[in-house]
Amino acid sequence: MSRLIVISNRVSRPGTSGSQGGLAVALSEALRESRGIWFGWSGETTDHFTGQIGFSEDQGVKTATIDLEEQDVDEYYNGYANKTLWPLFHFRIDLAEYARDFEGGYNRVNQRFADTVSPLVEPDDIVWVHDYHMIPLGQMLRQRGHGNRMGFFLHIPWPPTRLLVSLPHHTKLVQTLFAYDLVGFHTEEWLESFRHYVEREMGGKVAGDFVTLGDRTIQAIACPIGINAREFAAAADSAEAKAIYDQIRASLRQQAMIVGVDRLDYSKGLEERFNGYARFLKDHPEHHRKVVLTQIAPPSREDVGSYRQIRATLDSLAGRINGEYSDVDWTPIRYVNQGYPRDKLAGIYRAAPIGLVTPLRDGMNLVAKEYVAAQDPDDPGVLILSRFAGAAMQLRDALLINPYSPEEMSDAIQRALAMPLDERRRRWRAMMDSVESQDIGWWRADFTARLTALRDVEPDRVPG
Ligand code: ADQ
């Protein structure tokens, strides 16, 4: 078995379990099996970049991390990754900031990654690079002579060509993807947009899974990420889950809980969700005192202005809606800014007859799948899901809505509250079949099997 080298912005150590998500667990398993290495940024800063690697090993998983300079973090992580690519790839060119310093910092940090990881890469290793922070890394490794099999997986959407061309030097960035052998997206839609860009803007050719640009042919595929469905379902039956479930149900009395769980991010459509729920309260006074929206949203990326902005907007919107509709014994929105361990989260999902997952755009969205996996098979809740989440391609039996329409959201909440048990069971079963069969293990095995099946690239065929 070839050794796997995973490279991503941050690494996750098994020692920090409990907080380890499904992706981290699946990658850790693959690394353990292949005696591989997970390489990334330590999250720490240093005055002067040295390239010194901090190695550690935990439960059979080796990690290797480097510190970055403050300026790197500003320009690469907060800058190009989160102020430029993240909004642009989520179709928000109104929020995207284009600055040469950001692009320079992004390339510098990718070079730093390439310089430091390069001596660790042995000829038979398989290299798997993750996400928008590290797009050009594969090409930089090729430039250092590595002919290894290399894959790249994008965890966020791929934007339509007409938006992507607003990025300065867009062709240069996309061209670097041709250094990989295999490029994966969550859905056919993101894959189609990628192919469209390559054909229209670069004169490339598409034939099935193969995309050719000049003398390089790579495979580009859709490979939807999943969750550890069995483990999540078991978590919903754990003592921790039951305890929080009982606590919530006691506090609700007979009220029905609608739950939302998201990182506090403008792509998650939280403002639109609050507005849709407010519309429901306006349309359906008969449901006052009978429903509660619990929105769990731990803050993220607080060094980026647009994230501080969305937080302030939501604070005031939740206050306004509660001010308008609350009574002495009823608060329609419970807005919680903290994270929960996975067992508790599973209990929270199970306590909610409705899961409201309404991102404006999302590569996949794992919360939708977790909500499904945590349900009681005998009395499952209803998932209301944005048609703009990658997960909507698989979870066709959710109530699919346009998150920009408060009326659609209001109608869907009404429909979910009234849905008969046999329809809830039928829809849930179909969704659970998909969540179980295309789980995180399936995703990881599919991607790595395709990579393993490739033949090594000859270094002299490597694009410069
Ligand atoms: P994210 O944008 O972070 O991921 P998502 O897929 O929903 O979005 O995953 C979030 C994870 O964080 C879930 O596992 C969820 O349980 C957890 N989480 C969120 N709020 C939490 C809370 N309050 N307490 C505890 N846990 C919480 C990016 C892309 C997605 C893509 C994933 C994986 O943006 O589209 O699905 O990567 O590829």
Image (spheres, rainbow, N blue to C red):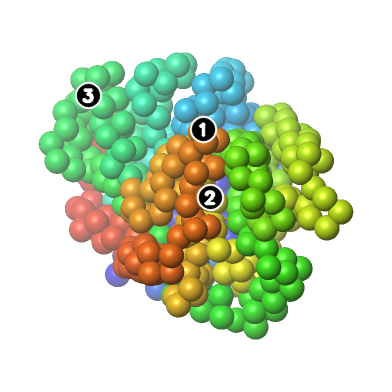
Residue 376 horizontal side relative to residue 264, left or right: left
Q: Which residue is mark 1?
A: 404
At mark 3, the secondary structure is helix
Classify residue 82 as left or right of residue 27. right
- Say which residue label 3 marks: 199
Answer yes or no: disc 1 within 8 Å of ligand 1. Answer: no
Residue at the extreme right: 328
Determine which residue is flagged by label 2.
413
Front one among 174 and 148:
174
- Distance from Cα at disc 1 to Cα at disc 2: 15 Å
Residue type, numbered disc 1:
Tyr
Q: CA distance from mark 3 to mark 1?
A: 31 Å
Residue appearing at x 60%, y 53% in the figure: 260
Q: Nearer the viewer, mark 3 or mark 2?
A: 2
Q: Position of residue 391 (x, y in %)?
A: 40, 50
Residue 430 coordinates in the image, percent (x, y): 33, 64
In the rendered image, the residue lying farthest to the bottom is 239
